Amino acid sequence: MFISPITVGCRTRCCRNAHSFPSVHFDGESRIFGFLGHTPRSDHPRRPKMRVLITGGAGFIGSHLAGDLLDLGHTVDVIDDLSTGSMDNIQHLTDNPNFSVEIDTIANVEKLEKMVAKVDLVYHLAAAVGVQLVVERPLYTIEANIMGTKYVLEACDKYKTKVVIASTSEVFGKSLDVPFREDGDVLLGPTTCSRWSYAASKMVDEFLALAFYQERKLPAIVVRLFNTVGPKQTGRYGMVIPNFVRQALEGESITVFGDGTQSRCFCHVEDVCRALVAIVDKDEAYGQVYNLGTTEEVTINDLATRVIALSGSTSEIKYVPFAEAYSADFEDIARRKPDNTKIGNLLGWAPQNNLDQILTAVIDHERSKQPN
Ligand SMILES: NC(=O)c1ccc[n+]([C@@H]2O[C@H](COP(=O)([O-])OP(=O)(O)OC[C@H]3O[C@@H](n4cnc5c(N)ncnc54)[C@H](O)[C@@H]3O)[C@@H](O)[C@H]2O)c1
């Protein structure tokens, strides 16, 4: 799978100062949708309204989060280079006067700093994401994730702006110490296996955020997201649920990679965003790392069976070896289950959607996109 070079951004004005990541090209004019220039408002009787920047806000999680923050009356700015995100994800928000989006890379540090200067809070979600992308483009993954996070933290540090860094359960690697606790050991595979570059780059992001907190007193929170799913997630970069649902609806074989005994815990993006919104109000969360995911565990075999049943499909299951799906040196993770006690204690948070509800929502969403 290859991601086409993107052709948005600004060569003349913006990219003079952009630190480019490999294989990502910018030309044409930078585009702004919506309205810029708002100041934070505090017209809510209980909670002051904020102006929030979401990096990667045209992505799957970022677009849901943007919608939730706007619903709460906050102002939302987005910067996204559309490398894996899409305008389709945020089109419904662009008429909202409290929403704006810049199509550009966070490597354009001049623009990033200007955007950070205007906001009260940053959610840093922009990253190279998806197993397939990571395996095929390790250099891009490493640079985009590590340098991108460094740019965001430096910009936030300049204004001491609160920042939430999206990390991943991948950092636990092959650890057998399940369920994973935030303070548990991690176990990555060898550097010759490119999939671990994603976990390693996100781990450096975590170290960076914690170092900025410790040495520069930057109010930063690290959230380790476990598999986050729901309507609008794309299957293009190897995400399992959208792929299974599309295959089931089209009557194709459901392709299970490996023997299907590996298990995952899939959390609804609505539940994840609820926690992301709430966590920034907790002073004790800054300087901390939190797992964020559900504990409902399912094997990939069982997931395929449930997708077939819930969609009324006649698809069969086809097994594809990992070596064929990804690369000869690919290593999978057998189980990935969070201990979510820490965030539960902090926020009183627990997921409200179970797997069947999630699958039904995704199936309904995908069906609604199909031609009649
Ligand atoms: N979805 C999950 O299951 C999951 C699990 C663990 C962690 N995460 C993390 O959550 C975050 C969001 O993931 P997602 O699932 O919404 O993926 P996504 O691919 O939909 O979102 C990432 C967004 O970042 C944008 N982006 C990438 N590089 C950029 C750059 N240099 N400048 C500007 N924008 C850039 C992409 O275009 C995309 O819109 C990521 O940091 C990811 O690592 C997600």
Image (spheres, helix red, strand yellow):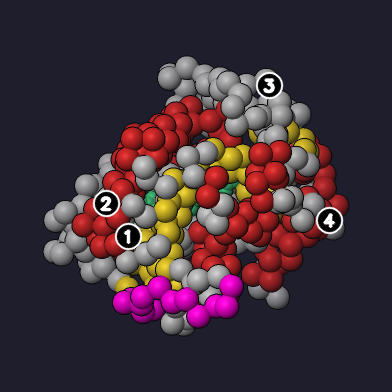
Residue assigned mark 2: 158
Q: Mark 4 points at which residue?
A: 310
**Residue 33 appears in which quarter of the rendering?**
bottom left
Between marks 2 and 3 in the image, the one whose residue lies nearer the viewer: 2
Label 3 or label 4, whichever comes before in sequence order: 3
Q: In front of the other: label 2 or label 4?
A: 2
Residue 276, image x and y in percent? 57, 54
What's the mark number on residue 177? 3
Q: In which quarter of the image is the C terminus?
A: bottom right
Label 4 residue SS: helix
Gap in angstroms between the C-alphas marked 3 and 4: 32 Å
Residue 180 located left or right of residue 32? right
Asked if residue 36 lies in the magenta stretch, the reply is: yes
Q: Which residue is drawn at 63% across and 27% down?
A: 333
Q: Is the magenta stretch mostly helix, strand or loop?
A: loop
Which is more N-terminal, label 2 or label 1?
1
User: Residue at horizontal 70%, vertical 60%?
Assistant: 362
Whether pointer 1 and pointer 2 mark residues with C-beta atoms closer than 8 Å, the reply is yes
| Residue at the (82%, 48%) spot, across then down | 306
Closer to the N terminus: mark 4 or mark 1? 1
**Marks 2 and 4, Cα distance to the nearest angstrom?**
50 Å
Amino acid tagged 4? Leu
